[in-house]
Image (spheres, helix red, strand yellow):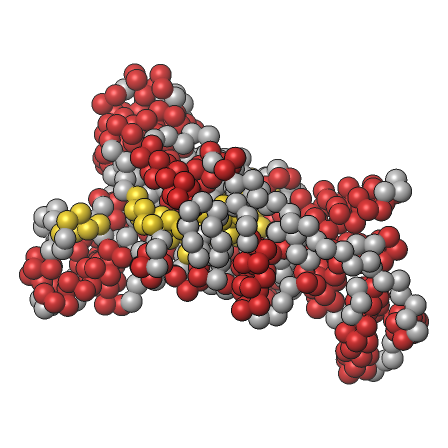
Amino acid sequence: MVRFEVLGPLRVWRGQSELDLGFPQQRALLALLLVRVGRPVPFGEIVEALWSGWPPASAANAVRRYAGSLRRLLEPELAPRTPGQRVLRRGGGYLLNAENSEVDLLRFRELVGRGNRHAAAGRPDSAVREFADALSQWRGPVAQGVREAVRAHPRFTVVEREIVRATATAAELALRHGGTAQILPSIRKAVALAPLNESLHARLVLSLAAGGAQTEALAAYETARHRLAAELGTVPGAELSAAHTRVLRQQVPRTRPSATPYRVPTQLPPDLTVFTGRAAELATLTAAADDAADAAGVAATVVIGGVPGVGKSTLAVRWGHQAAARFPDGRLHVELGGFAPARHPLDPAEALRGMLVSLGVPNRGLPDTAEALTGLYRKLMAGRRALVVLDDAAGSDQVRRLLPATPGCLVLVTSRLDLSPLVSRGARPLRLHAPPAREAEQVLARRIGAERVAAEPAAVREIAARCGYLPLALAAIAARAAARPHFPLAALAGELRAGDGLDAFPAGVRTAFQRSYRALPPEHARLFRLLSRHPGPWITPTSAAALTGLPVLDLSARLGALSSVHLLTEDDPAHYTLHPLLRSFAAELADEHGAGW
């Protein structure tokens, strides 16, 4: 399943993997198609939006090239020159085809529609909840990350006005019928988006007062008054002035404070129905859960590592679903974005805010400092039996504050790094390797059908071997095979045999490797490239010294560093191997940069 996010940072996910959306203009085209999802965007409008009225002579060809790249990105299993089902030529332009469940903007509109229907039917409490859920889809400026010149296009401002209207409606309902705490964070964001909207400012002032924040409500009025004077040369109008007067006279009904009950989170992504194998690794996680009840000081923690594409996140999610009954107090899942494209890793304080809201703490009840957020989180988790999955960690420092300080909880951390500081403090490391040949062939059988696999066992063995038994590569090739059910598997094996390096694989495989490579310091990146020319399967500091001319001692440290980020595998002490697909990737980079050290 593909998920699109445009109500905030522009992001696309396939399953649990975030896709690299490519060059700025390609990202801009996707964003434009997303804000018009399901409807064609005329070719001329695309050109106007992407080049702000100053298109190059090659604009038409460039748009077609970007559309083709998006089509291949979203449907990597497509055969060449196949139109696909996602990015379509329609109405003299292009159309993005997606379901409501796949696009945050469509989910937002669906929930707003429900809220309006509840309000019309006299069910204000249900209406406020639907509006709150709708506004939770909104995470920041629409299509954040796309160039500002593109985001100034009317298609994007129309969506922002739609969000502002929904916020104003929700705030009015909440002020009349209760529930302002659910809507207040969205009112703050809407005021920042439309800073001269007096009606929004009035609702912010009243909502703050309803929550008991009298001083903050008066300060919000003063902020609005100064802005109106500075930018428009006007004074507050009747609605904002009336709100100010009601606050001064303490005529705003207070929302009755109540203790927020612990909300049981169920945040795990969907399980992978074609998951196969990994029995030993699943048993290791079960053993860690058994130990969690006896852990002291902090929650039991497992750090799941391995080469890019080996299935770290998939394993954590599969086990979490299998073991759900062990954790009656819920399953938290946090995407830390340690190696996500086009964005920075999630700040621990921001992660804690999201986790606390998921556990039932209202936004207005969140502390300001990271220390206070950590204290509240650990207090709330005390005595609980919950699973916390921290996916794609950028380092130990990003994770430490997110660990509950209570026995009974289990934390699964996935990362492309070893996270040795966590291991030294008691976390259990679980390093994933590519599955054995038989298990890799079972992965293909689950995805493309046992009968088809049984009919061509030699081709299946060759496909699995040319994928290096890596789950990400196996899944990508299986998707291609499933999309062409009448093609013999021998033909697919032949494509891989004749392919040039990673070019035979969908772009997602190379992208997964690039995310780890880009995080390397220059000297480690150069060594990784040169290792593609290493003649034998075993890489040692001595053999690497012969290849590079560097001192053995320096290479011991650098090879260890590459192993710690899972670009090399240390099978025996100081004896490393390079996965075949990573070797192909390193060879591509070496050709691109030249052979010199």
Tell me where residue 241 appears, x and y as whole percent.
Answer: 90, 74
Viewer can see residue 165: no
Q: Is residue 295 left or right of residue 12?
A: left
Tell me where residue 35 appears, x and y as whole percent.
Answer: 64, 51
The one of 44 and 2 positioned closer to us in this rendering = 2
The one of 247 and 480 positioned closer to us in this rendering = 247
Q: Is residue 285 left or right of residue 463?
A: right
The one of 253 and 287 positioned closer to us in this rendering = 287
Specify the quadrant that holds the C terminus.
bottom left
Viewer can see residue 490: yes
Tell me where residue 532 appears, x and y as whole percent.
Answer: 18, 53
Name the residue rendered at 24%, 61% in the picture: 561
Name the residue rendered at 30%, 43% in the picture: 432
Q: Is residue 584 left or right of residue 317?
A: left
The one of 33 and 3 positioned closer to us in this rendering = 3
Above or below for 108 versus 280:
below
Above or below for 593 versus 407:
below
Q: Is residue 134 left or right of residue 307?
A: right
Name the residue rendered at 40%, 27% in the picture: 447
Name the residue rendered at 42%, 47% in the picture: 294
Q: Quadrant of residue 441?
A: top left
Tell me where residue 5 appears, x and y as whole percent.
Answer: 58, 50
Above or below for 410 versus 441:
below
Q: How many marks?
A: 0
